[in-house]
Image (cartoon, grey):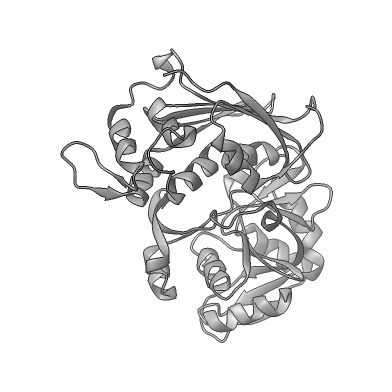
């Protein structure tokens, strides 16, 4: 299949510049939901993302195999492989996420769904090279009978654009932080804690109460201005018990994140560049979830730094890790205890940002 001629557009991720080249024009529509357009000519220091359909080199991806069959069904909102029960588009995307493999090295990251897509992120050159199978490109090319589902478009945006850009942004003007954040008119509250502390549940409850979300597990903090925040990968995924607790079963779809089955709240449908940035209004470190009621406890700088360190993850270990961010925020440190009282915890968050 002959691809569409390649086109180039430029975007302005927060504090940076990005050049997108692709032969799949609908990717520009997805990119415009993530980043504002930039009219300036190409800059030598821009992040470069190239996404093209596999062309004449089967060794790039291997055979389409079952994914080609899945995609034929997904075009119409369902997906099925020969001999398997019919599945909806969200289940199809779950199978992609479950097959997604990341490899991290000092000089480059690689991401692959066998037979469907392959991505290489060159850290030194700030360049992303992505190849997608012909069958995966059909919905993007407008050659399928129906438009791609929201599950497919959000998956492609995350995998081909948002996550690779975040890897590079976190090595340029930003630092990666293991934290969630919710925002309102007065700014954003950063919510940080170790694995299982309840970040995603609290963020989801705040979102259900009307606050915006920068992310539930990852965040970007400006190196030049630690109070400037931006989304890394802006998503919201929950374990099954948290989904049931919040009554969100019918408003979520299957997801595979962090090596386990979860449920995803769709944030991409309403995505826009302005929802991906905010000024920090406060930072709350998650303390003991019980007993309630929810309450904010002031911390001295040494106490804040000790509590902050409990949320450390290897992904933060770039250029000294998150220590500089912690020190910048320690002067007004606080901890949120008793967050099992979700209604009270959300009320405290809303009071800080509205």
Q: Residue furthest bottom?
A: 293
The answer to whether residue 307 is above or below residue 294 is above
326 left or right of 231 in image: right
Q: Residue furthest top?
A: 56
106 left or right of 259 in image: right
Q: Residue at x 83, y 52 (%)?
A: 225
Q: Nearer the viewer, residue 311 or 180?
A: 180
Q: Residue at x 51, y 39 (%)?
A: 159
Indicate the quadrant containing the C terminus: top left, top right, bottom left or bottom right.
bottom right
Q: Position of residue 268 (x, y in %)?
A: 54, 53
Q: Residue at x 50, y 68 (%)?
A: 201
84 left or right of 338 in image: left
The answer to whether residue 179 is above or below residue 45 is below
Report if residue 60 is visible in the image: yes
Q: Nearer the viewer, residue 333 or 155?
A: 155
Tell me the quarter of the picture where residue 10 sits: top right
Q: Residue furthest front?
A: 145
Q: Nearer the viewer, residue 284 or 35?
A: 35
Q: Position of residue 206 (x, y in %)?
A: 58, 72
Q: Residue at x 42, y 38 (%)?
A: 100
Q: Position of residue 164 (x, y in %)?
A: 59, 37
């Amino acid at each position: 299949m002959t691809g569409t001629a390649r086109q180039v557009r430029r975007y302005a991720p927060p504090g940076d510049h990005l050049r997108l080249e692709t032969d799949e024009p609908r990717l520009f529509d997805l990119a415009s939901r993530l980043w504002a357009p930039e009219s300036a000519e190409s800059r030598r220091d821009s992040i470069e993302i190239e996404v093209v359909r596999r062309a004449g080199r089967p060794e790039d991806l291997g055979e389409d195999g079952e994914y080609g069959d899945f995609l034929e069904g997904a075009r119409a909102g369902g997906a099925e492989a020969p001999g398997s029960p019919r599945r909806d588009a969200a289940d199809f995307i779950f199978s992609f996420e479950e097959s997604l493999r990341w490899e991290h090295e000092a000089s480059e990251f690689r991401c692959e769904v066998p037979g469907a897509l392959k991505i290489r992120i060159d850290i030194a050159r700030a360049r992303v090279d992505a190849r997608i199978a012909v069958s995966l490109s059909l919905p993007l090319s407008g050659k399928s009978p129906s438009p791609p589902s929201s599950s497919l478009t959000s998956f492609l945006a995350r995998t081909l654009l948002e996550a690779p850009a975040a890897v590079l942004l976190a090595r340029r003007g930003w630092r990666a932080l293991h934290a969630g954040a919710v925002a309102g008119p007065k700014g954003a509250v950063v919510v940080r804690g170790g694995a299982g502390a309840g970040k995603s549940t609290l963020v989801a409850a705040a979102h259900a109460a009307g606050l915006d979300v920068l992310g539930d597990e990852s965040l970007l903090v400006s190196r030049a201005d630690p109070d400037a925040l931006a989304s890394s990968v802006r998503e919201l995924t929950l374990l099954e018990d948290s989904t049931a607790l919040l009554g969100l079963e019918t408003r979520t779809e299957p997801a595979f994140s962090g090596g386990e089955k979860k449920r995803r709240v769709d944030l991409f449908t309403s995505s826009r560049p302005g929802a991906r940035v905010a000024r920090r209004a406060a930072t709350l470190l998650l303390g003991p979830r019980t007993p309630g009621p929810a309450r904010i406890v002031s911390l001295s700088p040494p106490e804040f730094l000790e509590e902050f360190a409990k949320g450390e993850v290897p992904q933060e270990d770039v250029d000294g890790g998150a220590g500089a961010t912690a020190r910048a925020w320690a002067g007004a440190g606080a901890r949120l205890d008793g967050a099992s009282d979700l209604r009270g915890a959300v009320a405290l968050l809303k009071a800080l940002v509205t």
